Amino acid sequence: MPSDTTLTAPTQVREAVVQAVGGARAAAAALRVASAEHKQRALRAMAAALRERRAAILEANARDVAGARSAGLGDALIDRLSLTGQRLEEMVVSVDAVAALPDPVGQVLRTTTRADGLVIEKVRVPLGVIGIIYESRPNVTSDCAALCLKSGNAVVLRGGSESFQSNTAIAAALRTAVASAGLPEAAVTSLPVADRSAVDVLLTLDHLIDVIIPRGGEALIRKICETSRIPVIKHAKGLCHVYVDQAADPSMAQRIVVNAKVQRPATCNAMETLLVHEALAPTVLAPMLKELQDAGVEVRGCPRTRELVPGVAAATEEDWSTEYLALILSVRVVGSLDEAIGHIARYGSGHSDAIVTQDEQAAERFLREVDSAAVFLNASTRLSDGYQFGLGAEIGISTDRLHARGPMGLEELTTYKYVVRGTGHLRR
């Protein structure tokens, strides 16, 4: 494969992308019929390879991070880009967790036997070739590769140019491991070009790729949806809310709110807007916001919030619909559960939203009426995650309604076919 530096002309970029994706298409045929045991060996080898190449991966990542700082990229993006020894070990653990999960391929979802003896089975099968377009986070490379291989799919990975060296190093380790297990190394394909035109080429290859899954900012996802010839499963913005009800336990509410915002603010499942019932706000809002501000959070509040906590900046209309991905929080005092649900319906992105309350009736109304991919009772939105949900890892968090919704694991990377068994049956 030619190096990135030699691929400067659009024709060369296209040829490199088509060649890489063509290899993935061929690999998908082998993966479709690979046994669960064979895929398991490959996954274990992938986890081992990440550990063995730890130094090379971290060195490549350090170069990416240095380049990002020189380019003046923001702290949130650099945080998502950065690998540490601990984060790399988490990648290994995630691959091992995927390996330990049951193989979904071949699972019989339903069997119908007609009166005349015709047997009709609905069976899980891989999607085929999955294109992943993402920004910043290198762990997406290993997570998506593991999930796709386990579910019998070939994957084409296109990370952001800012993480090109990290992703290349990770993918190289994974490809070597896959080949060592006797499967085609092109089962894990990372595009060999950092040039942005590679994405434009990728999105035209509907004869080679079965589905595109974008992971990144709102602008990236909008562009992909507008230009792709290939079906897209959207991972849209995560404008997540926590609503502290009048019947909330104040201590629990404070712990959940701080965790949802501060634990890792650059992720799509971090809280962006806090809603607090007016009956509880006079007692809980000040200590809650003080802890958040002590953690470095910039708070922007509605007029009632600013009355209760002097010094808070004024929230604008735009703030209610902004995914900050940073230590910034919008706060609104609401008069009722209805008002909280209405706010989420108007400004939310359908990702993940939570209520903190001891009132069972209010809790059930919130869980039933808030139409998001994940709704939480007395738990942080940061738990909206494939690994936390027992999926091993996630390919993304879909805010679509068709095919997949919420954290996407192995099952969401399969479709089904009908297997019909007869003994000379004819249509009468």
Image (cartoon, grey):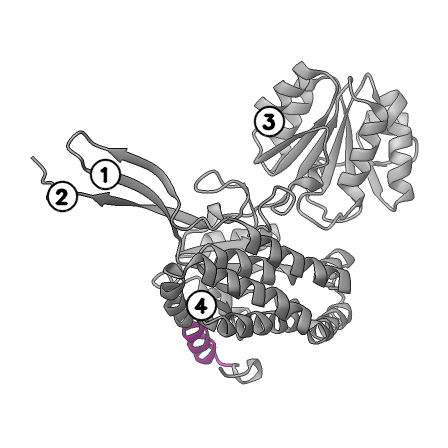
Residue drawn where x is 78% and y is 18% of the image: 246
Type of amino acid under label 4: Val
Q: Which residue is mark 4?
A: 201
> Label 4 to label 1, Cα distance in Å?
43 Å
Question: In the image shown, does 83 or 88 lie closer to the viewer?
Answer: 88
Q: Spatial distance from mark 3 to mark 1, Cα to Cα?
A: 41 Å
Look at the image and say whether residue 12 sits in the magenta stretch.
Answer: yes
Element under disc 1: strand
Sequence-wise first label, 4 or 1:
1
Q: Which residues are magenta?
A: 8-20
Could you tell whether 189 is left or right of 288 in the image? left
User: Which mark is in front, 4 or 2?
Assistant: 2
Of labels 3 and 1, earlier in sequence is 1
Few, some or many residues within 10 Å of mark 4 (<14, 14–19, 20+): some
Question: Left or right: 93 with respect to 373?
Answer: right
Instruction: Provide residue 51's location: percent of width, then percent of height.
Output: 68, 69
Of the two numbered discs 4 and 1 in the rendering, the one whose residue sits closer to the viewer? 1
SS at mark 4 in the image: helix
Amino acid on which disc 2 is placed: Thr
Q: Are marks 4 and 1 in contact (CB under 8 Å)?
A: no
- Compute the Cα span from label 4 to label 3: 39 Å
* Disc 2 to disc 3: CB gap under 8 Å: no
Check residue 423 in the rendering and tell me which mark sits there, or answer none: 2
Which residue corresponds to mark 3?
A: 370
Quadrant for the C terminus in the image: top left
Mark 3 residue type: Val
Q: Which mark is residue 119?
A: 1
Circle 2 SS class: loop
Up/down of 272 relative to 135, above or below:
above
